[in-house]
Amino acid sequence: MSFSIWVAGARPRTLPAAVVPVAVGTGVAISAGHFRLLEALLALGVALSLQVASNLSNDYSDGIRGTDETRSGPVRLVASGAKSPEVVKRAAFGFFLLAGILGLILAALTTYWLILVGAAAILAGWFYTGGPKPYGYYGYGELFVFIFFGLVAVVGTAFVQIGEVNLSEFLVAFPVGISSVCLLVVNNLRDIPSDSGAGKKTLAVRIGDCATRRLYITLIVVMFVFVALSWFYFRFGPLGLLAIPFSLSPVKAIRSGARGKELIPALSLTGRMQLALALFFSVGIAI
């Protein structure tokens, strides 16, 4: 029972946001003839650890602020009383520490400049909802997700295997970052009533329900436009467009006006779309 609660607290529906950039970055490395299994696995470990740590720190910070008391999403450890705030906080720090250790090993294998990037990612994970002025409470969550689970993760994964940074890596990082933003947009759309009541001014709260739905659909379109543009560097990169059918169900749910718990499946479907993008896009880039 305790293990299942922790699994729920780790928010498995959001984990594709950690897997996709590593897969795409590794696809870039394969295309360049520099695939390195150890570095790729370490990058995946860092990404997953940071994602879980960020989710748990969000659970802790929102829990002690009372933000999650009336939310309609899946169970939260602190708000539900399943775990004490201190236990969840220690778990979050434990995963941040694991990310740091794996990152140090990766830096030792490549360049110690990565320590600065890793430190920035850890701070971004904590201050999303932690600290006196969490940026997630002021509508900047989507920007930081795009940067760290898009640009940084893809380019970083490619860099630790290839040893250099190229413009092509940033081009393919854009649709990956956008796909991660889509996850956050669905999550924040679902939580508009509870977040606005708790004073959490997410982007969704700031622009409202209708505009958030339009934003999600726009992001999906822009994401696939960038996938198509990858042709300029990777001939078979547009294979990522095969993920389009996986985007239809979540878009339909968003357009239908689903609210509250009705949006939970849309979150899972968005994650499934991300995984499909990871598969088709990374394979296309690699070949």
Image (spheres, rainbow, N blue to C red):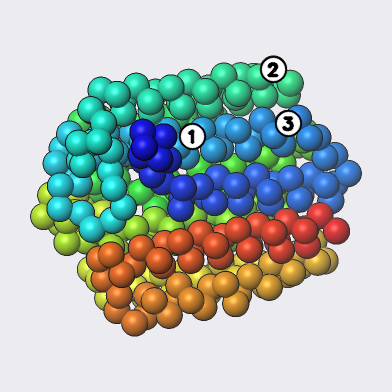
Label 3 close to label 1 by CB (< 8 Å):
no
Q: Is residue 267 above or below residue 138?
A: below
**Residue extending furthest front?**
1
Disc 1 target residue: 50
Of badges 2 and 3, the one in the foreground is 3
* SS label for mark 2: helix
**For this rendering, which residue is in front, 195 or 211?**
195
Residue 35 visible in the picture: yes
Name the N-terminal-most of marks 2 and 3: 3
Q: Marks 2/3: CA distance?
A: 11 Å
Q: Amino acid at mark 3?
A: Glu
**For this rendering, which residue is in front, 38 or 13?**
13
Q: Amino acid at mark 2?
A: Ala
**For this rendering, which residue is in front, 272 or 135?**
272
Residue 129 image position (x, y, % from top left)? 28, 38
**Residue extending furthest left?**
197
- The residue positioned 60% from the left and 33% from the top of the image is 45
Q: Amino acid at mark 1?
A: Leu
* SS label for mark 3: helix
Q: Is residue 182 left or right of residue 274?
A: left
- The residue positioned 24% from the left and 46% from the top of the image is 137
Disc 3 target residue: 39
Name the N-terminal-most of marks 3 and 1: 3
